[in-house]
Image (cartoon, rainbow, N blue to C red):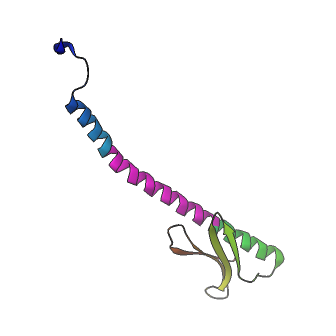
Amino acid sequence: MLWKNEGFFLAELLLALLTWLIAASFLLPLAMFILGENERIAEEHEAVRLVYEEMLWMKSKGTERDNYRVSLNGVEYKLSVKPGPGISKEVCAQYVGQGKNKREICRPVE
């Protein structure tokens, strides 16, 4: 009667469990890294968008604004105009990202 048993053996079950465990140990850190990179890229995209909006405002009004702050999605961006190389100016956005790293993005005003 026991010879016709069509179930799994304990060794096969342990092997399948070990396979899933090894796959998860590689895929879970990879997924966490990808999510962190996605947040970093989104923050950088917002900073660049704010810098270019400030440059458009400067070009349309002919003057520059004082330093000001904008808060988007839990990140505070500080926008400022700095003297650049030569006689040009740069619009800069400083922010502290989700990874607690301080970042700055500057673009020259043309």
Q: Tell whether 5 sits left or right of 21.
A: left
On screen, 81 above or below 75? below
For residue 96: magenta?
A: no
Give the x, y percent position of residue 15.
24, 36
Task: State the image quarter where residue 78 is shown.
Answer: bottom right
Nearer-the-camera pick, 87 or 94:
94
Residue drawn at x 64%, y 73% as measured from the top left: 77
Tell me how many marks there are. Answer: 0
On screen, 25 above or below 86? above
Q: Tell whether 36 sits left or right of 58.
A: left
Residue drawn at x 74%, y 83% as measured from the top left: 66
Q: Tell whether 66 sits left or right of 20.
A: right
Residue drawn at x 17%, y 15% as measured from the top left: 2
Image quadrant where one finds the N terminus: top left
Give the x, y percent position of residue 33.
44, 57
The furthest residue to the front:
1
Chief SS of the magenta region:
helix
Q: Tell whether 49 sits left or right of 6.
A: right
For residue 32: magenta?
A: yes
On screen, 1 above or below 10? above
Magenta span covers which residues? Answer: 23-46
On screen, 71 above or below 87? above
Nearer-the-camera pick, 78 or 54:
78
The furthest residue to the top:
1
Residue drawn at x 16%, y 14% as measured from the top left: 3
Give the x, y percent position of residue 5.
22, 16
Image quadrant where one finds the C terminus: bottom right
